Amino acid sequence: MAANQTLTSSITELIMSYYDKLLLEKLRANLVLYQFAEKKPLPKNSGTTVTWSRYTDFSAASALTEGTAPTPQVTSASNISATLEQYGQYVQPSDLLIMTAIDNQIESIIDLLGYQAALTLDTRVRNGILGTSSVPSGAKLPLQYWHSGTSSGYIGTLSSILGDMTMDTNNLREAAFNLRRLNVRPFEDGCYVAVAHPNVIKDIEADSNWQTWNQYIAKETMWKGEVGKIYGVRIIESTNMYNTTSGAGASTTAHFTPVFGKGCYAVTELDGGVKTFIKNPNNNDTSNPLNQWATVGWKATFATQVLHLSAGRVVVTAG
């Protein structure tokens, strides 16, 4: 065998690496919530559970006594765990389609699957933050029913959300105030983050305070999907934010907008957790006797969990 011979297995590995990269690029381009999470590599040979450690802050130190060493501090931590979950899907293109299509069918399918994977994982993170009924029971961020258009400010229940109680900048200021008073850490730029549906952002942008804050500010976006900032909160747009008409006031759609700081929630890293699978027909496949189709699919091993209940709020408004 020639020393520089290229083996079929080597080509296959290169092709699969290429399609893995395509899928991950498409996945990352459409994931909004993932970018703000604390990330941890997938555990190897550690079962189906991933664990994050949350350390308790030290209190203020006492004055030293001359010539006397203080009692050493003892670190305290609590562990927060999540069970690894798997998601995936595949497409079954026919041999005729692959042979006759003008464009590269495999790349086109990977593009579609990449968006599907992004939507799936982004929804899983979103539901983990909101604690909706579609996810396993567990931690969720507290809901904040507050609107400056009411005399008392706080509304109290979802059923009290009426059609004119749309998001304004005062909602964001109140959410940021609640985070600051609990010493929630901001992100590296000193700001918190709100992820909002376009309907909610439209209401924010109609607020005169927003227009005043942003009309002379250069758009120095830091995060993917960012539209601006106010009161120390950077606003990110996502069409995948949760909304519902169930339980809200008459003829009202309630929108849920998470506002949070650094370390609020965590995810497992995508690299190593997302794989593509491209399988061509072969002579031993009795389920495909005429070699009439191939399969192209993806699978993700993933976990997400809220780490700090006090590190975020979900602002509920009409939209």
Image: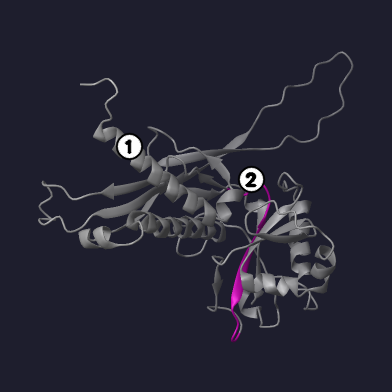
Give the residue displayed 77% in from the left and 47% down from the top. 190
* Magenta segment: 250-265
Q: Give yes or no for residue 261 being in the magenta stretch.
A: yes
Q: Amino acid at mark 2?
A: Gly
Query: Where residue 271 appears, x then y in whole percent?
Result: 46, 41
Whichever of callouts 1 and 2 sits on the residue coming sooner in the sequence is: 1
Query: Where residue 173 appears, x then y in whole percent?
Result: 78, 63
Describe the element under mark 1 as helix, strand or loop.
helix
Q: Residue 219's quadrant in the figure?
A: bottom right
Residue extending furthest toward the top: 67
Residue matched to label 2: 263
Residue matched to label 1: 13
Location of the N terminus by quadrant is top left
Give the residue displayed 80% in from the left and 59% down from the top. 231
The disc placed on residue 116 is: none
**On screen, 149 above or below 15?**
below
Query: Where residue 102 appears, x then y in whole percent?
Result: 33, 62
Describe the element under mark 2 as helix, strand or loop.
loop
Is residue 18 found left or right of 210 in the rendered image?
left
Q: How many marks?
A: 2
Residue extending furthest toward the bottom: 250
What is the C-alpha distance between the residues marked 1 and 2? 37 Å
Is residue 276 found left or right of 237 in the rendered image?
left
Query: Where residue 83 appears, x then y in whole percent?
Result: 42, 46
Give the residue displayed 62% in from the left and 52% down from the top. 309
**On screen, 195 above or below 249?**
above
**Residue 167 visible in this rendered orientation of the protein:** no
